[in-house]
């Protein structure tokens, strides 16, 4: 299976703290990879390194065979990497349509193509009915959908999702999972960081576990739940 992304021996330090310690991860085309671990294990740091928000102190990030380790975030978006955030990052008083169109215009210089991509992203995330609405008036679930639409509108081949289920009901989590599966079937790969393991294990095909900046396990969801080391890490974690 062809790799879409390879993190090769990635290390990131913040002063004396080693947030990532020689982490190597490979994501295949059209795969949903779950990334889990306790708070402070390095999950979001790894997402930030992949998206270009942070540069690693050591190691490389390879996307579709190209070394992107030193590229800026907007350059990675143009290549096909997009993301959502733990905290919603939208313009609260800009209508949903324009929130989604802005990143499209940053990638596609053709205004018609940007508009077409915006309509597509709003349709996929079931937001067309709220296109003229202000995000400040939306529910947490709809705000998550605006975030996802903004990630999808740039035509990514890899989407990084940071805690997409946080604050959602089981029914809403089911809807998010359904949308991700359909997008995945179209060929988009996903890395999903999530604490709600019961739902993530139903979505991900493979899971990587981080603890204290190190990769301690990698395997299928049913293998993760049998791992004694993972059980020790999560002892007492709901």
Image (cartoon, rainbow, N blue to C red):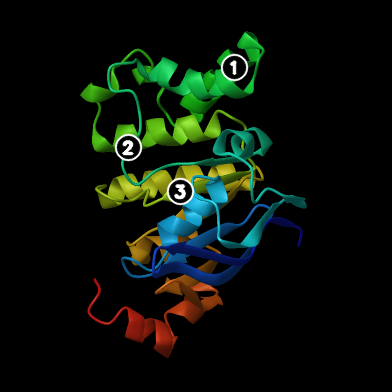
Q: Is residue 171 left or right of residue 52?
A: left
Does the image show residue 147? yes
Q: Is residue 122 left or right of residue 143?
A: right
Label 1: which residue? Answer: 114
Image quarter for residue 198? bottom left
- Give the percent coordinates (x, y) of residue 211: 41, 75
Above or below, comparing residue 134 to residue 43 in the picture: above
How many neighbours does mark 1 have within 10 angstroms: few (below 14), some (14-19), or many (20 or more)? many
Q: Residue furthest front?
A: 15
- Give the percent coordinates (x, y) of residue 110: 67, 12
- Give the percent coordinates (x, y) of residue 121: 52, 27
Q: Nearer the viewer, residue 121 or 13?
A: 13
Q: Is residue 14 left or right of residue 61?
A: left
Image quarter for residue 28? bottom right
* Mark earlier in primary sequence (3, 1): 1
| Secondary structure at numbered mark 3 | strand
Circle number at residue 88: 2
Q: CA distance from mark 2 to mark 1?
A: 22 Å
Q: CA distance from mark 2 to mark 3?
A: 12 Å
Image quarter for residue 77? top right
Label 3: which residue? Answer: 161
Query: Pointers 2 and 3 in contact (CB under 8 A)?
Result: no
């Amino acid at each position: 299976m062809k790799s879409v992304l390879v993190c090769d021996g990635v290390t990131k330090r913040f002063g004396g703290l080693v947030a990532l310690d020689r982490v190597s991860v490979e994501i295949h085309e059209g795969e949903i990879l779950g990334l889990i671990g306790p708070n402070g294990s390095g999950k979001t740091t790894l997402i930030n390194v992949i998206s270009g928000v942070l540069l690693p102190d050591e190691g490389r990030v390879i996307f579709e065979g190209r070394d992107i380790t030193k590229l800026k975030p907007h350059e990675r978006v143009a290549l096909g990497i997009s993301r959502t955030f733990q905290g919603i990052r939208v313009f609260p008083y800009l209508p949903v349509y324009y929130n989604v169109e802005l990143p499209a215009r940053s990638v596609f210089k053709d205004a018609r193509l940007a508009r077409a991509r915006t309509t597509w992203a709003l349709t996929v995330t079931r937001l067309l009915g709220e296109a003229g609405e202000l995000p400040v008036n939306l529910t947490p679930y709809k705000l998550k959908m605006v975030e996802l639409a903004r990630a999808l509108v740039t035509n990514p081949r890899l989407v990084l999702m940071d805690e997409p289920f946080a604050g959602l009901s089981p029914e809403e989590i089911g809807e998010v999972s359904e949308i991700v599966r359909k997008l995945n079937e179209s060929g988009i790969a996903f890395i999903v960081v999530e604490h709600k393991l019961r739902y993530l294990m139903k979505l991900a095909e493979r899971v990587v576990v981080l603890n204290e900046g190190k990769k301690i396990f990698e395997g299928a969801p049913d293998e993760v739940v049998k791992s004694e080391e993972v059980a020790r890490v999560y002892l007492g974690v709901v």
